[in-house]
Image (cartoon, helix red, strand yellow):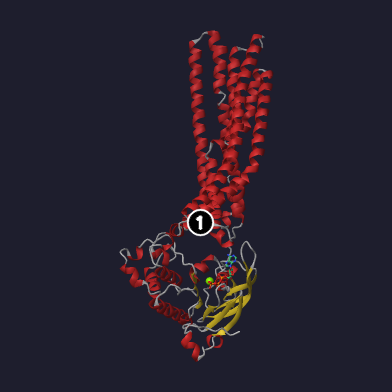
Amino acid sequence: MSRNKPDHQINGMGGLMAYVFGLSGIINILALTGAFYMLQIYDRALASGSISTLVALSALAIGLYLFQGIFDILRSQILVRLGARLDERLAPLAHKVVIDMPRYGYSTAEATERGRDVDTLRGFLASPGLIALFDLPFMPIYLVFVWLLHPMLGLLTIGGAVVLGLLTLATELLTRRHAKEMLRSAVLRNAVIDSNARNSDIMHSMGITGRAIDRFERANRRHLETQTKTSDISGTFAGLSKVLRMMLQSAILGLGAYLTIKGELSAGSIIASSIVTARALAPVDQAIAQWKGMVAARRSHARLKETLAVITDDDGLLALPAPQESLTVEAITTVAPHTGAVLLSDVSFELKAGQALALIGPSGGGKTTLVRSLLGIWPTLRGAVRVDGADLKQWPASFFSEHVGYLPQDVALMDGTISDNICRFTDTPEPRSIIRAARQAGIHELIVRLPNGYQTELGPNGMSLSAGQRQRIALARALYGDPFLIVLDEPNSNLDSEGEEALMLAITKVRARGGIVVIVAHRPSALQPVDMVGVMQNGKLVAFGPKEDVIKPPAPQLVRQMPERVVAAE
Ligand SMILES: Nc1ncnc2c1ncn2[C@@H]1O[C@H](COP(=O)(O)OP(=O)(O)OP(=O)(O)O)[C@@H](O)[C@H]1O
Ligand SMILES: [Mg+2]
C-alpha cells in the first residue's frame, strides 16, 4: 500500500488541477466574446452601416462562443472524472478505516460518516461551487477590460468586487462556527437511526417504537436546526450579493451613460462594460451560494486526510514461513478503547502445537477480552502475542486469513451465501475444503437439505438460519483451510448435543494435525477434548495448567447436586 500513500492520493491531483486552471483561463478570455461583439457592432458595424461587417463579426462571435462551450464542457467532464478517480483510489482506503473504527470504540454511525467523506468530496468536484472557485482568479481579466474602456468604470467594478469579497468572507466566518456542529448532529442522528434499525424486534415486542421515533425526532430536529442556521447565513448573503451585483450592473450603466453624455465613452462601451462586470462578479455570487457545500467539502477533505493518516502499511512485512510451533502470550495488558479502563492485566501463557486450551471463569471475567487481544482485534497496551516467536505485528494480513480461524461470541455472518461465508469470501473457493469444514462443523447434511444448498443467501447477519445453525456455519468458517490457530469464543452456547459432539471431534482433529485451539467455555463438556485449562477472573489469568491440575474432580456428593460444576484451583 506504500504506492497508495494517502496524502499523495489527495494531493497528487495537482497536474490535472493545473490543466483545469489553464482551461479556466481560456474560458474566461473567451467569455469576453459578447462584450467585444457588442463594442464592434455599435462602434463599427452601426457606425459604418456595413452589413458585410455585421455578418463577419457575427460569424466570428458564433465561432468563439462554440469554442467557449466546448472548453466549458471539457472542463466539467475533467472535473467529474477527477472526482471519480479520486473516489476510486480513496474509497477503498477510507473503507478500510471504516471497518477498523468500531474495534476502537467508535459507533458504526461515526464510521460510516467517515466513509461518506469521499462521496462529499466527489460531489463537490462536480459542483458549480468548484467551477466558481476556478473562475475567481480570472476576475482581473474583466477588471482590466473595463478599466481600459474607462478608468472610472474600472474603479467602480473593483469597488463592487471588494464589497462582494467581504460578503464572501463574512459568509465564511459566520458559517465556520456551525460546520462542526453540523457534522456532530449528523453523526448523532445517524447513530439513532442505526440503533433503531438494528433493534426492530425489541421495539415491536416491547412496544417502544413510539419512543424510538421520539428519540429520532429529537436528534433530527437538532440536525435540521444547524442545517437551517447554515443555510440561512449562506442564503442571506447569497441574496445580498445578488442584489448588490444587479445594483452594480445598473450603476455601471448609469456611470457609462454619464461618461457618454460627457463625450468620454462610446455607446457600445456602456453595454460592453455592463456585460463584463456581470460576468466578472458572477463567480463571487456562485461561490457564496455554494458556500455550504464548500464548507462540507473542506471538512470532509480535512477529515479524510486524518482518516487516511491512520492507515498502517503492512506491505513491507516479510512473509514468514507458515506457523507450526507455538502461541506465546507475554504479559499482555489491554485497556478498553475510548474509556481506557484496564480490562486485562499481565496475562501470560504458552501453548505448543497440538495443544488446546479451555478458558473458563465467571461472566465478565475477561475471557472474550483475552481472545480479542490474542487476535490483535484490540491492541495491547503492553506485552506481546507471539506465534512461532514472531510478534503478531510482524505477521502480514495474509497470516490471519490463512492461519487463523475465529468464532466470535456474537456470531455474525456476512451478507452472502453459505459457501461465501465458510470460505471467507475468497476469490478462489475450494469446494472440497468448504465441504470438509462444513462436515467437521457437523452442518453439511443440513446445508445440502436447503433448497439452494451451499448457495443459500443468508441476508444480514445470517438471519435466515437458527442461532445454532449460524453458530455451526461460523464454526465451519473458523475451521476452513485448516488454520494453525483456532480461537472459539463459546462455540457451543447454542449447540444441541449432536452439534457439541461435532465440535469436540473437530477440536480433537485440529490437535491431531498439529494446530492450536483456544476455546472459551461455560459448559464443562467443552473441556473433554482439551489438555490445558485457564481460569480468567477480574481480567487476570488466575490459574493455568494441564486440565487435571486445574480442575479438581468434584466431590461425590456434589456430583448429584450440581453435575456441571467446575471448580477452579487457585
Ligand atoms: N468495549 C468495551 N469497553 C469497555 N469495557 C468493556 C468492553 N468490552 C468488555 N468490557 C468489560 O470487560 C470486562 C470483561 O468482559 P469480557 O467480555 O471479556 O468478559 P467474559 O469473560 O467474556 O464474559 P462472558 O462469559 O459473559 O462472555 C467486563 O467487565 C466488561 O464490562
Ligand atoms: Mg465472553
Q: Is residue 184 left or right of residue 502?
A: right
In the displayed structure, 346 sits above or below 106; it is below
Q: Residue at x 63, y 15 (%)?
A: 254
Could you say where residue 179 lies in the image, as x and y percent from the top left?
Answer: 62, 44
Q: Residue at x 58, y 63 (%)?
A: 316
Looking at the picture, tell me which residue is in the foreground, 246 or 78.
246
Could you say where residue 125 lies in the image, as x and y percent from the top left?
Answer: 54, 41
In the displayed structure, 282 sits above or below 469; it is above
In the displayed structure, 297 sits above or below 38; it is below
State which quarter of the image contains the C terminus. bottom right
Could you say where residue 186 lies in the image, as x and y percent from the top left?
Answer: 56, 48
Q: How many marks?
A: 1
Q: Which of the 4 quarters of the picture holds residue 456?
A: bottom left
Q: Which of the 4 quarters of the picture holds residue 204?
A: bottom left
Residue placed under numbered mark 1 in the picture: 195
Q: Which of the 4 quarters of the picture holds residue 326?
A: bottom right
Q: Is label 1 within 8 A of ligand 1 (CB to nearest ligand atom)?
A: no
Q: Residue at x 60, y 32 (%)?
A: 236
- Which amino acid type is marked by label 1? Ser
Q: Is residue 516 visible?
A: yes
Looking at the picture, tell me which residue is in the foreground, 262 or 285.
285
